[in-house]
Amino acid sequence: MGESPKITDPLAALENARVQFEQAEDFTIAVEEEFAILEPATLEMTSGFERFDVAAREHQTLREMVAGELIRSEVEVRTGKCGSFAEAAAAMAQRRADLLDLADDLGYRLCAAGTHPYSRWEDQQVIDTPHYAIVESTLRYVAWRNNTFGLHVHVGIHGADRAIAVNSALRSVLPELLAFSGSSPWLEGRHTHLHSTRTEIFTKFFPRCGIPDSFSGWDQYAEFVRFLIDTRSIREHTEIWWSVRPHQAYPTVETRICDGQPEFARSVALSGLMVALTADFARRFDAGEPLPAYPGRDLEENMWRAIRWGMSGELIDLAARRSIPALERLEQVLDQVADTAADLGIAPYLPPLREPTLSQRMDELMEDGADPRELWPDVVERNQRSVGEWLSDREGAL
């Protein structure tokens, strides 16, 4: 979304965040995609972020759009702040295509699946930044095991209390978004039989992660953040890793639940759905409609279904208190946001959500005896080719 304000006092940053939300522009968008850096011959994860960082600083479109994450074998690319979803989708395509070209120049491959199928966490190294030095020194083994890759979407929301209301409402659809994005059915050379192994590694390991509590407004949220700071539980707000969170620096509501996507069209579709859901809840709040509020225990039950069976199983329609096929739940969610998605120009990007997820396709092959190592090259290749195909399809539609 741009550079964060340089405020080092976490309490001052919290107070500043409320001011920023009160001045925020509605429904601005930024998307972040995380990629594993791969050695070309073996397609193993390999350290290389520092080379991407140096090269991106001299790149016309990637300058200030490339960032490091926890490990040196990972690189993140950002769209920057966009005023519409069409602009965000075009920026996603440009950034991914340029990053892939840069990887070729540097002698690497990239892939955005939620987990790598066989690289060992013991072989990865934490990057040398002040933030991740804090993370590693605090979490140790928990941080070392987190070799995962996600898709994060920021949406600008005007008003601090309104942002908290939207954040709380988005809790209700986190399991669905995870199911729609499953791309990590493997880890350490094994078929895990999970559709999102990434979620077990990250969300279930890290503190202050997963589904947050619902907050009544900014004051209650800020009280909790102050409690964490006062008790020296955190040193900065970015140590709150909830699957949806008010991001204090930008200011946005950031949805962080989805696995990374090798198939670019699905990455765009998931991003569009997250934007549409965020905007739809904001509009409902403005109209005085009640927003969904379910106990964490109910949401966690749905979350497990998303982790284990993804789109191949059933999810719980919490409003009706019954299990339904995940595909039926997808159609319910798409119906819920249909008007907002049409108004914001998102609807044309959503059809790929009806296609099988990567985990569905890989799970079927592995059930028939395929080895994850045999399947990985095709996944990496789709990661490379899919953005070019998407750009060609868009040009043909114009």
Image: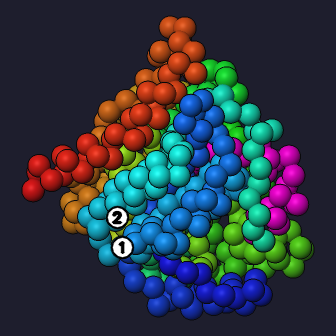
What residue is pinned by disc 2?
91
Give the mark, 1 or 2, whose residue is nearer the N terminus.
Answer: 1
* 103 sits left or right of 336 in the view: right
In this orientation, which residue lies closer to the viewer: 326 or 88? 88
Is residue 57 shown above or below 11? above
Residue 164 pos. (x, y %) = 55, 73
- Residue 296: tell me if it is visible: no
- For the point 65% across and 60% down, the residue is 50
Residue 159 pos. (x, y %) = 48, 84
- Residue 144 is covered by the magenta coloring: yes
- For the point 66% across and 87% down, the residue is 6
Q: Are marks 1 and 2 in contact (CB under 8 Å)?
A: yes
Residue 333 pos. (x, y %) = 36, 47
Q: Which quadrant of the figure contains the C terminus?
A: bottom left
- For the point 11% across and 51% down, the residue is 397
* 144 sits left or right of 182 in the view: right
Crowding at dot 2, Cα within 10 Å, few <14 / some 14-19 / many 20+, comes out as: many
Crowding at dot 1, Cα within 10 Å, few <14 / some 14-19 / many 20+, comes out as: many
CA separation, marks 1 and 2?
8 Å
- For the point 51% across and 42% down, the residue is 109
Label 1 SS = loop
Region in magenta: 131-155
Residue 244 pos. (x, y %) = 57, 60
Q: Amino acid at mark 2?
A: Ala
Is residue 195 shown above or below 267? above
- Residue 3 is covered by the magenta coloring: no
What residue is pinned by disc 1?
82
In this orientation, which residue lies closer to the viewer: 218 or 127? 127
